[in-house]
Image: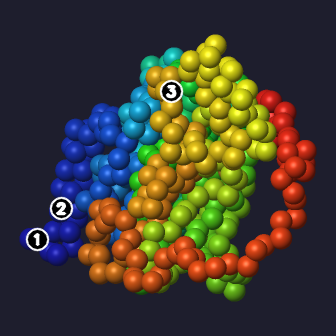
Amino acid sequence: MTTRRNFLRASGGALLGAALVSKAAQAGVPEAAVQSKPDTQPLLAPPSGRPYQPVVTLNGWTLPWRMNNGWKEFHLVAEPVRRQMAPGMTAHLWGYNGQSPGPTIECVEGDKLRIFVTNKLPEHTTIHWHGVLLPNGMDGVGGLTQPQIPVGKTYVYEFEMKHSGTFMYHPHADEMVQMAMGMMGFIVVHPKNPGSLRVDRDFVFLINAYDIEPGSYTPKVATMTDFNLWSWNSRVFPGIDHLVVRKGERVRIRMGNLTMTNHPIHLHGHNFTVTGTDGGWVPRSAQWPETTVDMPVGSLRAIEFVADNPGDWAFHCHKSHHVMNAMGHNVPTMIGVDHRGVAERIINLVPDYMVMGERGMADMGEMEMPLPDNTLPMMTGAGPFGPLEMGGMFTVVKVREGLAKNDYQDPGWYKHPQGKVAFEWNGTAPDAKRVLQAADSGKVLRARKPAGHSSH
Ligand SMILES: [Cu+2]
């Protein structure tokens, strides 16, 4: 006689059997997805597991997973990669699954993660899960909590994601070299309740920096502070994609800093609050308005704002040397130095000789200078009104009316309403008394910066 109780027991047994079969069938390591493009990839809506609102990884992508008996299984492959940092310049870096940074890992509070890590680098490595609260032996500190993963081997990390939030992963083995080579990735743990902490658009990127001689491909790994490429997700202006948002939407931008210095990240046209760090979410009562958030080294910040002001809003690091590309450094300050005459005499001897900088360096933004292979102009980019004169950690938040819900396509430059753009005054102006007379200004301004400065 089949009672309900017996039936349940029997079907339970059958389920267990089926599970065992599938576990055996799936005992292998999941295939490692690879990304070859440096463009921002479309959102990865979760095909399995708990629902959530996916994030947009700026110039990056999210790693697909497979479910296996209640575990979310991911496969990261540490390997040498080629990363286009902006059109015209490619770096030879180390990363994960074809790119630097590696793919974003997205999961949900309460998920059990099994992450396979295969080492295809020429030296050993580990992965540390920065900010994630997990068992000590899963923390990925080479020598301290595990042996380093030897070349060619695969290790497995297993832990439960106990808290939602904003985290990152990076090696804790030969760190100076491996981080200088670009090994890092983002982790987003979504809240169990998809309605809580909800925003309309959620962007993520890591702040990193490289020292790559113009004309070469591989970063100098011993550089301590004097980097020449200040990047977001291993991209520099004009290679960083724009952040496209619809007017009225609530926007979150999550950033992590894995460089050797702090970065004051500034947004124009809006104020925001810091709503989260790698330590968790900030209670509303502890939030205050800002337009710049200082990103300490080894930290993550989530900022949120309502995009209520349409336009093309600059979004950048406020250290002026970090919105420049390579070659911007050992240039003496020539402002106020009159080259006329001298230049003509040198040109007679050296036909390509070029004078720059006596009226500031704005000219460089529009000059087409011959560059060595594989480098980028120091100040570059074109906007609707002229040269942007930028590099490094600079992009644009484009706030537009009436975009579709998940439309991230570049809408082009902002069309300003009539009479709402700064304009030239064509009337008469009172004669302004100049503080410095021309004869004195040269004396006052003839300054020369020391070469090889290292404190920025
Ligand atoms: Cu900076």
* In the foreground, 218 or 64: 218
Q: Is residue 110 above or below residue 101?
A: below
Residue 296 in view here: yes
Disc 1: CA contacts within 10 A as few (<14), some (14-19) or many (>=20): few
Secondary structure, mark 1, is loop
Q: Is residue 202 above or below residue 19?
A: below
Residue 207, percent from left and from top: 59, 49
- Is there a contact, CB below 8 Å, between mark 2 and mark 1? yes
Disc 3: CA contacts within 10 A as few (<14), some (14-19) or many (>=20): few
- Would you name the residue on which mark 1 appears? 2
- Viewer-nearest of discs 3 and 1: 3
* In the foreground, 446 or 82: 446
Colour mapping used in the image: rainbow
The first of marks 2 and 1 along the sequence is 1
- Would you name the residue on which mark 2 appears? 10
Residue 395 horizontal side relative to residue 416, left or right: right
Q: Is mark 3 within 8 Å of ligand 1?
A: no
Q: Is mark 2 within 8 Å of ligand 1?
A: no
* In the foreground, 197 or 448: 448
Q: Farthest residue in the left direction? A: 1
- Would you name the residue on which mark 3 appears? 371
Cα distance between the residues tagged 2 and 3: 74 Å
